[in-house]
Image (cartoon, helix red, strand yellow):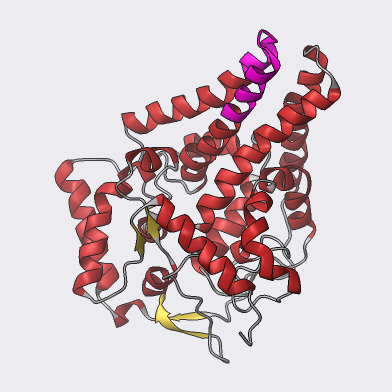
């Protein structure tokens, strides 16, 4: 069951969200446009899937030298991260298509990269999107004891150096997902605000068979097919995963663990100061909105504000509706957190890692 002790202020306390929804609906209606994937989104999907599994096929061909094979492993990692951003994320939010079966089918792309879509829906779609940047509840703030990502998290002496080792730690995220994280989440009694969480047997079965498939095609098949030493395989395997892990881990942190967004918690009675839409505006940040390559590759996740307000709108539309949200925020004098470039967002994240890693007395 879900613990409902945390209560947000009533939404009617501000007309902000009603105006934003009305304006966004008007945008889609006037353009006679679906809120789901368009042909450009389908083309992007085919591109990142081809980059991922085309690189995999070329690796298995064995036609290339060691350095070329290493390069293909890096390309596969970039493709895997892009698939997570552009395909899995939208599908698991039900945003890719108006047809549930298409979302479900494409959602399995996440499982076949080594993560578990069912658990992601719980920790990300429900917990993170509802309790964004609430310390002790938002699972995205507790990715590892090595990283202190909120002011309420326990601080250890080594956190002083986290801005040096955070990026290498991010690079291990997909390996952690494949071999440890999902299993640990399934075995937890409590997940965020969920108490004594029970998982359907079908989802446990899905966890097992998808992990076995990933191990088979990522580890067993290459070792059987390729005439290489085991240590060469390990280098390639790590290169692929560390590339995907670094990109995925970093991009998701740039939306909330940067300068601008707040860490907001409830009072002693569990009441939040703001309504949920205002809370999302105060705890979320965009970045690199004018960078077309970033916008294309990260699947609109750099428009995190729009994603949190409209998670069931396909990410391909976020650049267009961002101005609608920005204008409404300005009218209501609500902060619209934004870092203009990818470099600025990364720099701001490093600054936050330094601040959160310092002793409280400094």
Q: Is residue 80 left or right of residue 348?
A: right
Between residue 308 and residue 282, name the one nearer to us.
282
Q: Where is residue 296 in the image (x, y as percent from the top left)?
A: 38, 38
Q: Residue 330: give x, y in percent of width and height.
A: 22, 70
Furthest-right residue in view?
Answer: 230
Q: In this picture, which residue range is highlighted in magenta?
A: 57-75
Can the viewer see residue 213?
Answer: no
Answer above or below: position of 121 versus 331: above
Q: In this view, does 67 lie above or below 296?
A: above
In this rendered view, identify the residue nearer to me: 269 or 198. Answer: 269
Residue displayed at 43% across by 57% down: 345
The answer to whether residue 151 is visible is: yes
Q: Give the residue displayed 63% in from the left and 44% down from the top.
A: 245
In terms of image quadrants, where is residue 353?
Answer: bottom right
Q: How many labels does the image show?
A: 0
- The residue shown at (24%, 77%) is 333
Which image quarter is the C terminus in?
bottom right
Q: Does the magenta stretch include residue 105?
A: no
By secondary structure, the bulk of the magenta-drawn segment is best described as helix
Res 10 quadrant in image: bottom left
Q: Quadrant of the N terminus?
A: bottom right
């Amino acid at each position: 069951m879900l613990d409902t002790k945390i209560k947000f202020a009533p939404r009617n306390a501000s007309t902000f969200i009603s105006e934003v929804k009305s304006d966004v609906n008007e945008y889609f209606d006037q353009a006679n446009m679906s809120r789901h994937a368009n042909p450009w989104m389908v083309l992007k999907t085919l591109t990142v899937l081809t980059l991922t599994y085309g690189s995999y096929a070329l690796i298995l061909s064995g036609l290339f030298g060691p350095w070329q094979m290493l390069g293909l492993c890096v390309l596969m990692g970039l493709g895997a991260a892009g698939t997570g951003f552009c395909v899995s994320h939208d599908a698991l939010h039900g945003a890719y298509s108006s047809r549930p079966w298409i979302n479900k089918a494409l959602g399995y792309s996440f499982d076949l990269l080594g993560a578990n879509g069912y658990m992601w829906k719980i920790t990300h779609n429900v917990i993170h999107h509802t309790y964004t940047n609430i310390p002790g509840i938002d699972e995205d703030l507790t990715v590892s004891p090595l990283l202190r990502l909120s002011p309420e998290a326990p601080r250890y002496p080594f956190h002083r150096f986290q801005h040096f080792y955070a990026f290498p730690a991010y690079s291990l995220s997909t390996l952690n997902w494949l071999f440890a994280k999902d299993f640990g989440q399934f075995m937890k009694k409590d997940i965020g605000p969920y108490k004594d969480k029970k998982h359907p047997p079908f989802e446990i079965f899905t966890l097992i068979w998808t992990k076995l498939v990933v191990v088979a095609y990522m580890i067993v098949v290459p070792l059987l097919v390729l005439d290489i030493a085991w240590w060469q395989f390990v280098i390639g395997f790590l290169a692929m995963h560390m590339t995907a892990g670094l990109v995925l881990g970093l991009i998701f942190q740039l939306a909330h663990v940067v300068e601008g967004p707040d860490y907001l918690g409830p009072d002693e009675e569990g009441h939040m100061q703001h309504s949920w839409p205002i809370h999302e505006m105060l705890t979320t940040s965009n970045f690199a909105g004018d960078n077309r390559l970033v916008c294309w590759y990260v699947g609109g996740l750099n428009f995190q504000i729009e994603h949190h307000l409209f998670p069931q709108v396909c990410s391909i539309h976020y650049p267009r509706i961002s101005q609608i949200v920005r204008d409404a925020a300005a009218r209501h004098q609500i902060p619209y957190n934004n870092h203009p470039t990818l470099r600025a967002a990364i720099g701001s994240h490093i600054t936050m890692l330094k601040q959160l890693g310092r002793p409280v007395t400094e």
